[in-house]
Image (spheres, rainbow, N blue to C red):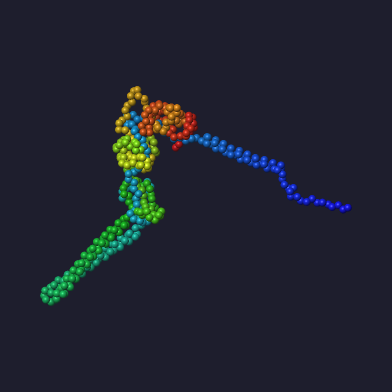
Amino acid sequence: MATTEIHPKADLGSLRIHDRHRSGGQTGKRLGYASAVLGAIVIIAGLAFAFRNQTPAVEVVTAQKPESGGRSAILNASGYVTPRRRATIAAKITGRVTGVFFDEGTHVHAGQLLATLDDSDTKRALDSAKADRDASQAAIADFQVQLKFAQIQLRRADQLQKAGVQTQEYLDTASTNADSLKAKIELAKQQVQSSEARIREAQQAVDNCVITAPYDGIVVSKDAQVGEMVSPISAGGGFTRTGIATIVDMNSNEIEVDVNESYIARVKDRQKVTAILDAYPNWEIPSHVRTVIPTADRQKATVKVRISFDKLDPRILPDMGIKVTFLSDEPVKKADADAPVVVALLPSDALHEESGKKVVFLVKNDRLERRAVSVGSTAGSQTEILSGIVAGDAVVVKGPANMQDGLAVQIKK
C-alpha cells in the first residue's frame, strides 16, 4: 500500500504575538513616562531655585533733616517743568523745503533765518507784476508827449477860430483829443498803482518762503528736512509736514502741578515753594506760586497750579519731572525744652505697622534692617520721626510684600 507524504501548510496565525510576550514593550513605556515626569520635576525645581535666589529690588528715599527756623511744609505735589512760550514754527504757505539752517539744541535769536522754501513761482509772479508796472509807466510817458502836442493844436485851433479862419468843429476836435489824453494818463497812473499793489503782494509771497525765529530761544525739535513739503494746514496725508521746528523760550520755564481739590485751599498766590528736580534730588530750588488756574479737572478731581522759579538755571529743562513742597506762611516755631525732638522727616509710604507699632526698613550693606520708630505729626505726605533713625538713612518706600530683617535686596536705579 502506497504511503502519501503530507507537507505542512503555511499558517499566518502562527505569527501572532501573545499578550504574555508583550511585557517588554509595556516596561519601555513606563520608563519613558517616568523619565518625562523626572525631567519636569527637575525643571520646576530649577525654576523655583532661580526665583528663590533672585534678589528683590526696592526703592529707597533718604531721610530728610527737619527744618529749623524756616517754614514748615503743608503740602507736597509732583509735576513737570513746562515753558510758557513754546511754539511750533510753520510756513504761511505750502511749499517745498530748500534749506534748513538749524539743528536740535541751536540757540536762535528773533529774526534769525531757520529755513527757506522754493520761491521760483513767486519770483516769476513778482517779475510779471514789475513788468506790468514798467509798461504802465512807459505808457504814461507816451501819453504825456501826445498831450503836449494836443495842447499845442488846441491853442492853434482856438486862435484860428477866433480869427474866423477855422470852424468851431475843428476847435471841438482839438479840445476832445487833449481831454482824452489826460484821461488816458490818469488811467495809466491807476494801472501803475495796481501794479505796485501786485508787486507788494508778490513780494510778500517771496518773503513767506523765508522762515525766521519769532523770539529768542532754543530749538528742541527739527520737524522738516530739505526736499519735504510743508503746509500751514494738514494736507497730503503723511507726506506733508505742518511744522519746521519747535522753539522753546528757556526764560519762560515754570512748574505745572496738579493739586488734589481737597487740599487746594492750602495754596495761595505768591506762596513760597521748594522744588526738587528728579534729575537733581539734592538740589532744592526756591520758587513761588504764580497762579492757580480757576478751574478743576472733574476726571482727576485736581486743580492746576503754576509755579515760577525764583531764579532760572540752565540745568532746568522742559518736561523734566519735579516734586514741590508748599510752605506755610509762618516760620517753624522753636521746640520747647520738654517737647520731643524731630530727628528726621520721611514719606508716610515708608512707614509700616506691626503689632500696633511703626517700623521702617533700612538698606545697609545690601540687606534690610528692621527699625522700630517713634513718629510725630504728619504734614502733607511727610511724617516726623522722633527716634529710631537719623537724617541721611536710606529707607525703603516700595519693596516686596515679604520684607523682613536681613533680607538681601538691591536698590532700584
Q: Residue at x 38, y 30 (%)?
A: 383
Compared across the picture, whether 325 is left or right of 408 comes to left
Residue 148 left/right relative to 349: left
Q: Position of residue 174 (x, y in %)?
A: 17, 72
Query: Looking at the image, which residue sits at the far top?
Result: 338
Residue 137 falls left or right of residue 354: left
Residue shown at the point (26%, 63%) measured from the top left: 133
Q: In this view, does 157 lie above or below 54?
A: below
Q: Which residue lies furthest to the bottom in this view?
A: 165
* Quadrant of res 315: top left
**Quadrant location, the C terminus:** top left
Say whether residue 315 is visible: no
Residue in view at x 14 percent, y 74 percent: 168
* Relative depth, front residue between 148 and 359: 359
Residue 366 is situated, as x and y percent measured from the top left of the image, at 47, 32
Residue 197 in the image: above or below residue 86: below
**Quarter-wise, where is residue 136 in the image?**
bottom left
Provide residue 276's location: percent of width, then percent of height: 37, 37
Above or below for 319 versus 383: below
Place of residue 150 in the rendered image (x, y in percent of width and height, measured from the top left):
18, 70
**Residue drawn 15% across and 73% down?**
171
The residue sitting at the right extreme is 1
